[in-house]
Each structure stands twice: as structure tokens, then as C-alpha cells.
Image: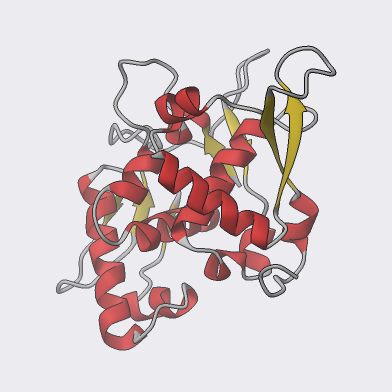
Amino acid sequence: MPLAETFVRRLKEDEPPPLLAQLLTGGRGGEVRLKLYLSIVLLATKAPHDIPAVPARVWAEALDLSDPDRNGARRVGDAISWLEDHRLIESERRRGTPGKVRLLSQDGSGGTYSRPVSPRGIRAYFRLPVGLWEFGWINRLSGTATGMLVIFLDMQSGRNGPQWLAPSVAKRQYGLSPDTWAKGRRELEAYSLLKVDRISQGAIFDYKRMRNAYRIDESALGKAPASRGT
């Protein structure tokens, strides 16, 4: 499932926070917003990139929300309204309930959606493994961990080996606080999805200046999650 890199991180310092960070930090309900949006992108694969009307209760059950008939359905409705307000989707309302949903551009401009493509020699998108849904990870992980999974996959896309990013650069590019970064990272490690290596910052044997380098084990997403820390 392709995601545009501009959805995940800003390419210029004067740009607003990326939409991924806005999804997670724009008030309560960030987890539902993020998981719902990613699921819509997964399903709306063909032009005009829309999906038939899905009752909010069904979405709530699919995302394993508590009380799907009432509170869960309300949370889904709030998430759809947020995605509409931020011009990521448009929805045909039917007596206040979600109708057919159509994806809009992943840059939040409200333009027509098109699957991300990379110009020659330029990486403009990366992919999320379908195992995130097929094996139930989308429901097991918190919203913060899901967001950090997306970020780490962006970091390592098209590159070999563990990837390192300075904390100041991470905040500037991805727009998430150090606390959010650390919380999501710890959860991914607990599920053995994230491998963290310690590598030297300077000379190859300079052990006084070590830094963390990250790598998502994509093969782990291809099987059902075990308990944390096992």
C-alpha cells in the first residue's frame, strides 16, 4: 500500500507539520483517525478511489473499538468528519451517517487522489505491508506505535541497513514530540517489530559517542502478533 512521503514528513522547514503528525496530535481521537484513514487508502485502490458506504458501526468493529454500536460508531463518525475537514477524503452523508467515501490527494490540498509514483531517480513514496491488516497488527498496536511504524518504514525505504536520525531532525521532519517518538518506539520494540542497534557516531571504534539506528523487521508483520516482550 503506497503512501506519499509528503504525507509523512515535511521536505522544507517552512512547511506545516505533516499530515501524519496532525492526525495523531490534532486533539483526541488521533488513533481512530489514523487507522481509519490508512484502512481507506488500503481499500480504495482503483479510480475514482472510493469505497461504498460502510456503516460507522462496521468500521468500529473492524478497528476493534469498544461499544461499536454507540461510542465506537461515534468515534468513527468524528474521525470521518476530521478527515473531511482536513481535505483528505470526501463523504456522501446519509441522514448524518457516513456514505460513500472518496479519497482526495494525500497532500491535504483537496485535489483529486492519485496513487503516488516516483519520478525517475526520485523516491516520492514508500509502501506499508498488507500484513498490518491481514494479521491484525492494525488493532494490536496503539495509534502512536502505528504512526511510528509508518515513520520507520519511510526512513528505511530504499535504503540498506539500520537507519539513524538526529532527534532535532526527527522533530523537524516528522513533527512529533520526543515523548511520542519514545513511546511508539518502545511499543514496537516490545512486539519485536523494531530492531535498535547501537553504532558509533565518529570513528569506527569510537565507543564514547554511540547513537541508535532503527530497522523495522517487516517479516514480523507477516505473522500474527504474539504477546508483548515474547
- Left or right position of 148 against 193: left
Task: Give 168 or 201, whichever is nearer the viewer.
Answer: 201
Residue 98 visible in the picture: no
Residue 25 x/y as whole percent: 31, 48
Identified at 16% across, 71% down, the residue is 96
Identified at 45% across, 24% down, the residue is 168
Identified at 20% across, 71% down, the residue is 94
Task: Give 58 or 187, whichever is nearer the viewer.
Answer: 187
| Colouring scheme, one of rainbow, by chain, secondary structure, one colour | secondary structure
> Residue 75 sits in which quadrant?
bottom left
Above or below 4: residue 85: below
Residue 45 x/y as whole percent: 55, 50
Identified at 35% across, 80% down, the residue is 57
Q: Quadrant of the C terminus?
A: bottom right
Above or below 44: residue 67: below
Furthest residue toward left: 95
Furthest residue toward front: 208
Residue 29 x/y as whole percent: 30, 62
Task: Give 125 or 54, whichever is nearer the viewer.
Answer: 125
Above or below 22: residue 37: below
Residue 221 visible in the picture: yes
- Left or right position of 173 against 3: left
Task: Give 180 or 75, whichever is nearer the viewer.
Answer: 180
- Left or right position of 13 against 116: left
